[in-house]
Amino acid sequence: MRTLFILIHFLFIYSILPAQEVIWGTWESWGDMGDGTYRNPVLPADFSDIDCIRVGEDYYAISSTFQYSPGMIILHSKDLVNWRIAGHAVPDITQISPALGWQQMDRYGRGIWAGAIHYHNNRFYIYFGTPDEGLFMTSAPVIEGPWEPLHCMKQEKGWDDCCAFFNDNGQNYYIATHFTDNYKTYLYELSADGKNICEESKILINEGMGREASKLYKINDFYYHFYSEHIPGTGRYIMMQRSKNITGPYTEKRQLSYAQPEVNEPNQGGLVEVPGSGWFFLTHHGTGDWGGRETSLLPVTWIDGWPVIGRPDEKGTGTMIWQHTTPLQHETAGGYSIQRSDNFTTSGLSPQWEWNYAPREEKWSLTENPGNLRLKAFVPLEQDNLLKAGNTLSQRSFRTKHNEAVIRMDITGMQNGQKAGLCHYSKNYAMLGIVCEQQKRYIEYKSGTQIIRGSGITGNKIYIRSVWGLNGESCFSYSEDGITYTSFGPSYQLQWGYYRGDRIGIYNYNNLCEEGYVDIEEFCYHIE
């Protein structure tokens, strides 16, 4: 009877919320609505494998970064809706493997996968796995770092989706999934410093059906193991099992939400309690598209001691919610937004930037021509292949109704064989920029094997622009004065590949020799 009352109550509450959008990828508005509500997705860009915690009045999230450098992006919010980039936990990803560096570039679709963030004894801890190298951790006294050099907890292929648990009795635990062995999830004892697991202590607590996204929570008198599972023909959905003892047995379990392929299957994320506002679940949408795996914030309804994710139906199972009341009002929250544009006047790269693989450090500078990003060209691993060209600098492409990205580039220092400009890429790519041949410079569009050469460029400044909307169709153009733009090349459909959405990037390489440079004076990225 109590369960029925709770369901009726919440179905009434949700029935008086604003009308719900249901078609994926058609949102005209998103995030903070400015009226005490928000619309999902709160981050319409590729923040995959997200996890979230609260520390006092602050909320922190991490997101997997695969082969990008620096690795493991960290986000900060005051209200779970408005976010900014706080930094990265792994400044040198070649600590994991030299395959993640510019000399090899051999980890597309791999590298840093899903992780978990924790705060314990006045210190932040981040744990993650890589499918090829094993399980890793790092820690820092403050979220901005410095983060300790990576510590390998288990050097073995085939593990992912790990999470620590700092128990209130002093005995710590750790879980990870052996995905190459029927997705077996094991619980281990964890050392007091959070760095090492005891192999002899491992207990099998779950397996099968593509199980991922493990998290451990203690709420009231129960230990909860959160995970997702996948059944062919049904999709991926959220599950939870619980026990009065952390080591189990976990004999009680419940499905918390439906697979929901129509909204790209929200499933992996972090449960967070907001004082005075209840519980919320920050999640990615696990079925990727050209926008990546976007992030939504779903309210949580507790029914019979289980946290149902989203809008409960008559069975007490959760479904997607597009609009909801903002968890809390904070005076600084509205000032938080994901950084995008850059005039390169700071001492280091702004945190929105990530190199495609660890960069060749001596081939870029913010000090040689202050107020500019100088990119020095070198030969790619494969001639004229953007995905094998080192030092491509990128950030996430947003999926909103209007996006416009422009670079202003000084090409005075270009040399024969050099190419530089603006690109979109995931598994495939398209690029518009300048090519230098016989000391003459031309506009050039390239996508795969298609190359279109344009007229000569006589000035030393060039503006390259890409414009796209909710359909992900990018149109390139260029200008020599920053006012009048000329469209060039066919439109390019932004794409999904290697578990990543599209990236907007700045490229610079030389097919012939290690000569030439460009100065990026400004990158402007406007979204609506």
Image (cartoon, rainbow, N blue to C red):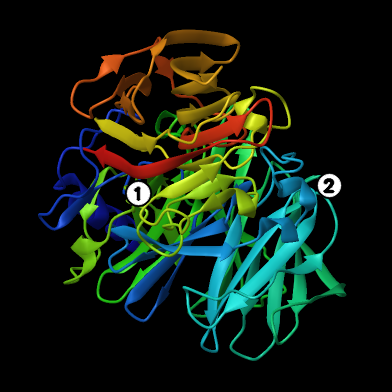
Image quadrant for the C terminus? top left
Residue under label 1 = 312
Is 347 on the left or on the right of 105, as rendered? left
* Residue 210: image location, x then y, percent: 69, 42
Task: Determine the residue positioned at 60% across, 28% down.
Answer: 386
- Taking the spot 56% from the left edge, 17% from the top edge, the residue there is 438
Residue located beneath label 2 in the image: 181
Question: Measured along the vertical axis of the image, is residue 148 above or below residue 400?
Answer: below
Q: Which mark is residue 364?
A: none
Q: In the image, residue 475 lies at what x, y percent?
A: 34, 18
Q: Nearer the viewer, residue 295 or 299?
A: 295
- Which amino acid, by three-letter code, is at mark 1? Pro
Closer to us: mark 1 or mark 2? 2
Answer with left or right where residue 185 lies relative to residue 524.
right
The structure residue drawn at horizontal position 70% and vertical position 71%, both measured from the top left corner, is 174
Of label 1 and label 2, which has the lower sequence position?
A: 2
Would residue 244 be visible to someone looking at this image?
no
Q: Quadrant of residue 108?
A: top right
Relative to residue 324, is residue 501 depicted above or below? above
